[in-house]
Each structure stands twice: as structure tokens, then as C-alpha cells.
Amino acid sequence: MKRKVHFLFYMFAAMSIIFMDQRVAGAFTGHPIKVDGATNDWTGIAPAEPNTWTISNGEYIWEDAKGDDTGNGKYAYPLNKALKGGCDIREVRLTYDDKNLYLMIKCDRPGEFWTPLRIVGIHKEGAAGGMTVLAQGDVNEPNFDKGVCANLKVSPELACQYVIAISSSAYKGRIWDEKGGLVARKEGDKKDTPGFKVEGTNWNSVEVGIPLELIGGSPAGQVWDVIVAVGQQDFDVARKIDVDASEWNGGGGAPNNSNPYVYDLAGADKETQEKEIGSYNPNAPFGLPDGFAVIEKSFLKIDFRYEGPGKLSRRGEDGEGAGFLPGAGVFFPALLSR
Ligand SMILES: [Ca+2]
Ligand SMILES: [Ca+2]
Ligand SMILES: [Ca+2]
């Protein structure tokens, strides 16, 4: 009996090595997530150091610093206590399987149920084109289907093929393509795009599931630069940040309102993101993207290429590039259950 167990063990080990060898570049996966708002299926271990990333259990994990929800360094929240807080990014996680991309974005808890507007831009390295003003829409007629009016611009090197926005504690969502065309919506009604899921059970975290076919296919074998920005929402577009804070609007912005309406970014330290959010032209005419701040360094670089055995978990600072591999546990149970 014991010998048979040993034999089975070696057979499974041999099979798993053969299986692994067949997983050529780009053939690996992360793992499925149940998009139900409960985050206990994100099993990777977050890095201990703020503003660093790791790959753990098939998840890319960015741990953002606490208390860097300062925008250009001077941003203040609105005075109404319901709108105090909620835009301090704490953690961003990303994984995928053969059907969906999954995101989890955790922020601090707002004073009331006014959970924030989370904006995610995806730049696929090597892709041509892309949008640099992230799903702005029409500032004179704000409409969540058209964009978020956040005055958020990225450098041409980060031009996005897709932009995703998540709004409010009703956990609504939109996805736009690089021309600003609406790709998917989740409003909680009959017109929702099948498979696009946004759920939360508290006011901190949100889980998002995006069918890969909606965003140009699997990330396997590619390198993605992912911009994550968080501001407050006002009828599902970005809540204005004025010169002076008022009951319902934040302060610390520009007289022409060309400043980005986001308090925190992922991917860089406080100093870098404050400089980038503050890089707008305060004298440019209202609403013209020429005067918008440009985000160049505050993004997550996620490398989905297979880099060979022995790189199951690597840790690093922003911009070093990351391997993205599943733990052996992803496929071992599948073999053992046959
Ligand atoms: Ca879940
Ligand atoms: Ca933060
Ligand atoms: Ca940050």
C-alpha cells in the first residue's frame, strides 16, 4: 500500500513536470475569483512594505501607502462628513483565468456610503494608438456612459486601449475602448453587459470581473501598464475639486478646474504622484485637455510573460518588471482529483 502511494506520488510529480514543460511562454494562468464582493478568495500574501508589489498565489499585488490621498499635495476632502475620506488606495490586486480578468481595489472607508470613483487604464505595451485623456466624456453634459470627467491624462507612452470606471456603493461600472466608445456597462438592470461584474460588500473593497473578450483577449504573454486613480463620484462622474473645499466639493485645485479630480494613484511614491497630479496648467481654458496634468510614472507594470521555473514569486519596486506565475497548487489539485 505504502509503495503504491509512493508510486502515485512520483507519477503525479512526473506528470506535473511534463505538464509544466508544456506551459510555454504565455501559457500560464492566474486563478478564478468569485465576484461576489467577499475578498477571501484573494489568497496571495501582500508585501509588507508600502508602495511595493509582489506576485503571490497567481496574483499581482500592489500595496499602496496610507495617507497619500493628497492629490497635488494640497487636496482636501469636502466638508460634509459623509464625504470625508474614501479615496486613499490601500491595495490593488489583479489576476485572471481563461475567461476573465479580475481586479480588487481596496481603499480607506469613507464617512458614509459614498464609496469612490475608481478609474483603471490599461495600456498594452507594444499596442498602437490608445487614449491619453482617460474617458473624459462631455464636461458640459456629464454622463457615465460617455466618461468620467476626471481631467485625467497620461503620457503618450501610456495611452490606454481600455479604461474601466467603478462608481458608488451601488457598484456600477463602465468600460470604454481607446476611442471612448462604450464597451460594457454594469448598472444593475436588464441592459447590463453579460459577464461584466462589479461587487462589494463593504465600503472598502470592490471586486471586478471582466470577460477577456471585452478587452481584446488574454493578457498572457504580454506586458500591461495599469493606471489606477481614485477620486470621489457625483452622479457617477468625478466630483469636482475646487480652489477651496466646500460642503460637497474638495479643495486645493486650480481656479480653472483643470486639475485632476483624483486624490490618489497607484504605482509611485507620494512625492512622485503629487508632482504628477500637480502638473496641470492653472491658466489653460477650462475643460481643454492641453492644460491637464500628465501621469507618466504612476502606474503598475505587470509582466504576464512566462519567465521560467524558479521565479514563482518575485518582489520589487515600481518599474522593475514582474514575472507572473501561478503557484504549483493551481494545477496539482486538478491532477490529483482525476
Ligand atoms: Ca470574491
Ligand atoms: Ca494610498
Ligand atoms: Ca498612492
Image (cartoon, rainbow, N blue to C red):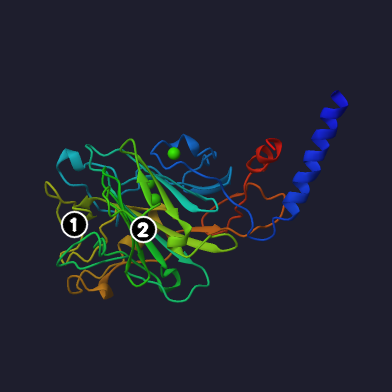
Q: Quadrant of residue 157?
A: bottom left
Q: Quadrant of the N terminus?
A: top right
Q: Which residue is mark 1?
A: 240
Which circle's residue, 2 or 1, is located before the other in the chain? 2
Circle 1 SS class: loop
Q: In x, y percent, where is residue 263?
A: 30, 52
Q: Quadrant of residue 84?
A: top left
- Residue 268 as seen in the image, left or right of residue 70: right
Circle 2 SS class: strand
Q: Which residue is mark 2?
A: 164
| Disc ID at residue 56 | none
- Residue 295 as seen in the image, left or right of residue 57: left
Q: Amino acid at mark 2?
A: Ile
Q: Give the farthest residue toward the top.
A: 1
Q: Callout 2: 10 Å neighbours few (<14), some, many (20+)?
A: many
Residue behind label 2 places its C-beta within 8 angstroms of ligand 1: no
Can you tell me which quadrant of the image ligand 1 is in?
top left
Task: Please tell me whether residue 335 is drawn above or below residue 314 in the rendered image.
Answer: above
Task: Please tell me whether residue 45 is drawn above or below residue 305 in the rendered image.
Answer: above
